[in-house]
Image: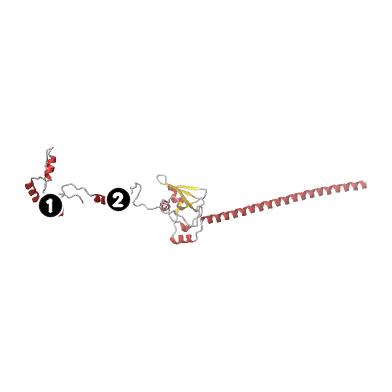
Amino acid sequence: GKYIRVIKVDAIELARLEAEDGVSIATESVAPGKEEERKREDTKVDAIELARLETVEGAPIVMESVAPTKEEVKKEETKVSAIPEQAPESNNASPSSSPPRAPISLPNYILGDEARTTHYNASSTREEAAIDAKSLTAGDAAFILRRDYKWAYAIVVEKEEGENSRLVFMADKKNRKTFPESAWGKYIRVIKVDADELAKLEAESVPHTKIEETKEETTKDADEERNKGSKKKKALTKTEEAKEETTKDGDEEGNKGSKKKKALTKTEEAKEETTKD
C-alpha cells in the first residue's frame, strides 16, 4: 500500500502512447533472447508524460523500485515488534472451558456422619441420581448408602471415566467404597442444600478437628463406662464366689459338728449299756 501502485490508463491514452512511442503494453509472445529488450522498451516514458500520468486519479505511477530509508525501516520494525505474540493454541484447549470449581462439601459434617433428609433429594429416582452423580469429581462430598440402609457422608477420592466408569469414596478413616456406574443411582446421592440452609450450617459450623475431638471424647467416656461396669461385675462375681466358699465351709463345719455329736451320742449309749450290765 505504501510502495506499489498499479498502472491505470484508459483506452484513448493507451492508443496515443502506442502511436507516439511504439510501446506495446498488450501482452504478446516474445521470442527467447529479446525479453530484456522488450522490458526496456516497455518502460520508456519521458519526463513530461510521467509527470502527467502521476496526476491521473491522484495515483503516482512508479516505474522503478525505491529503497526505503533507514528511518522508515526502523518505524516498520517498531510496528512489528509492538504486536504481541500469540501463544500457540493447545489441542486440548476448549473455547468454552471454565476454571475448575471448588470441591462440594458441607459444614459440620465429617466422614461417616448420617445425612439429614434436608441435605439431599430423598425423592429422586435412581435414574435422576445416576445423572447427578456424573457431575462428581475427586474432592467432592456426597452421601453413600451404608449396610444399615442409612445415607452417610463420604468424599470422592478417585473417578475413572470411560467404558469402566467408577467412583471411589473414602467412607471413613479406614474404609473405601467403590461403585461402578451401573450402581450410582442406587448407592449415591449428591448434596442438595438451599441457600438459607447452607447459611445456617455455616453460621453453626465448628472446625472438623473439634467435632472429631468431641466424638473421640464421647467414645472414650463410653468405653470407660463399659470398663467400669465390667470391673464391677467382676467384683460382684468374686464376692459371690467368696460367699459360696464361706457357705461351703460352714456346711462342712456343720457336717463335722453333726458327726461329732453322733459320735458323742454313741459313746454315751455305750456307757449306759456298760452301767446297766
Residue 96 in the image, given as x and y percentages of width and height: 34, 52
Please say whether residue 1 is visible from this viewpoint. no
Residue at 85% x, 47% y is 263
- The local secondary structure at tag 1 comes to helix
Q: Is 162 left or right of 25, judged from the image as shown? A: right
* Disc 2 and disc 1 in contact, CB within 8 angstroms: no
Q: Amino acid at mark 2?
A: Ser
- In this rendered view, identify the residue nearer to me: 189 or 105: 105
Q: Amino acid at mark 1?
A: Ala
- In this rendered view, identify the residue nearer to me: 161 or 234: 161
Name the residue carrying label 2.
81
Q: Earlier in the sequence, mark 2 or mark 1?
A: 1
Residue 247 in the image, given as x and y percentages of width and height: 75, 51
Q: Is residue 196 above or below residue 96?
A: below
Name the residue carrying label 1.
51
Please say whether residue 119 is visible from this viewpoint. yes
Q: Residue farthest to the top?
A: 32
